[in-house]
Image (tube, grey):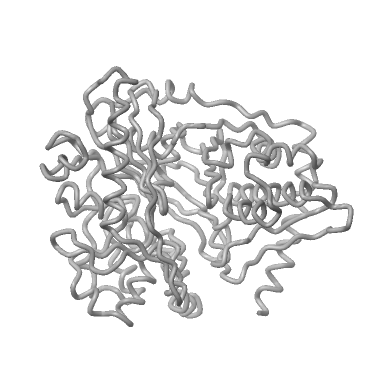
Amino acid sequence: MIVGVDIGTSVTKAQLISRDGRTTPAHEARSTVYTLPGHRVEQDLDDVVGTVETVVRAALADAAQLGDEPPEALALTGQGDGLWLRDATGAPVGRALSWMDGRAADQLDRWTADGTLRALHQRTGVGLFPGSAAPLLAHLAEHEPERLAAAHVAGYCVDAVVQRLTGAVTVDVSDASQPFLDVATRTYDETALELCGLSAHRRLLPDPAPPGTLHRLLPDAARRLGLPAGLPVSAGPFDIPACAFGSGVAEPGEGNLIIGTTLAAQVLDTEPRPAIAEDAAGMLLATPYEGRYLRVMPAMIGTAGLDWLLKLLDVKIEALDALLVQSPPGASGVTALPFLSASGERAPFVDPRARGRFDGLSPLAGRADLVRALCEAVAYSARHCMETLGVTGTVTACGGGARSGEWARIFAGVLGGDLEVCDDAVGIRGAAHVAWRSLGTPVDPGAWRARLRTVTAERGLIDHYAEGYAAYRQALDIAREGWSTR
């Protein structure tokens, strides 16, 4: 069995997973997220490592449910982007800068105005946002150069935890793809660094680990985790690509939709070609599998906006399906733009000024109509992302939003095809998938796919939502003109 860990932004999860895909219940521990003035969002590495230790020990107590098999490896995945500075011992150089951090927004505005952003996208296929490593590094180089001088490595969440557990200074190729990597050669693009004015800080970037790399647990870390010293540790990919592989994406053209706190759409390809998107949006990621790449549209919308609306309406999340049933397709004429993040939007277009809205309101509109309108709008955004990516094959879906039967029906109708939904912790499944391959004993992806359930796209909904999507795109175009004048 594999001990799988998903180090999220605010919650770390762990569970045991067997080769046939069976899992034990997930154990969770919350991390502290510091939201500070100046749009700063930070985390403490020691706190995050502590959550990993807590959930791993809790998960190991469930080993009897899988037959008390000995653990074969510890497989890690987790949040991407941000900036996690460490010294040579792995100690943090100040708090980590979260992917939600906005202090570098001005730097990103300058790069947008002078063409740096588009030039970088043309070289690496990566679109930036304020919480990306490049603008955060540039911000620190300008405002806190002493922090960079004290650092030995500038990495990400997963590799920061790996260094503490194994002593290895490493980075997974998926994390390294953001934003300086030539994904075809798996080496850093020196021109990309020059474009961002960061060539002097190249020393902080560890070379990506080759496919199949395994690290080994240090004795002290093993004791704290309750695992054997020297146990293999697989590091990555980060959570978005881990969800693709954990959902069973295996063939070029197949897509995956993560309906989580934020929404992410992705498609697998055998060629390192970025999505053709406006505003230099999206990601192009190398993966743990040579010759396989992921094009990604990581939107800022998702279940977080729905949570805000439900709280405003004093409705529990458990009532979501019942509310969606109470409102007909089209939400009785109520429509929405779902851009409810303070950071605006980053895919499939980039606009920090993007804001949400509701239209078509009247005294006849009820809570159910508002909720359905927002859920339909998120699905329209997902279709916008998928069309931009050029998905041609089966689409899998995962995340909290996919567990809602009624919302999943909306997504299937809007996307115009059946959805294959995975209810398991797919990030952990994906990390375990990579770990077993690295151990030389890959799992059968077909057997894992058999655990998916199909949400059928209904003909009537497909036709209705085709018209709704066209109206959504028109409303979005008009709104974007207004945002540009602010």
The residue that appears at 25% across and 37% down in the rendered structure is 74
Percent x, y for residue 309? 67, 55
So how many labels did they put on this image?
0
Percent x, y for residue 418? 63, 31
Q: Where is residue 143, by image quadrant?
A: bottom left
* Residue 263, placed above or below residue 434: below
Residue at the limit of the structure toward the front, as seen here? 314
Percent x, y for residue 373? 74, 50
Q: Which of these two is toward me, 132 or 10?
A: 10
The residue that appears at 45% across and 31% down in the rendered structure is 248
Question: Is residue 348 among what the camera can see?
Answer: yes
Q: Which of these two is toward me, 25 or 349?
A: 25
The residue that appears at 34% across and 28% down in the rendered structure is 17
Residue at the limit of the structure toward the bottom, as seen here? 143
Q: Where is residue 210, by image quadrant?
A: top left
Q: Where is residue 32, by image quadrant?
A: bottom left
The residue that appears at 19% across and 75% down in the rendered structure is 149
* Residue 326, placed above or below residue 299: above
Percent x, y for residue 425? 44, 36
Question: Is residue 416 among what the camera can see?
Answer: no
The quarter in which the C terminus is drawn is bottom right
Left or right of 55, for residue 167: left
Residue at the limit of the structure toward the top, as seen here? 67
The quarter in which the N terminus is drawn is top left
Q: Which of these two is toward me, 329 or 108?
A: 329
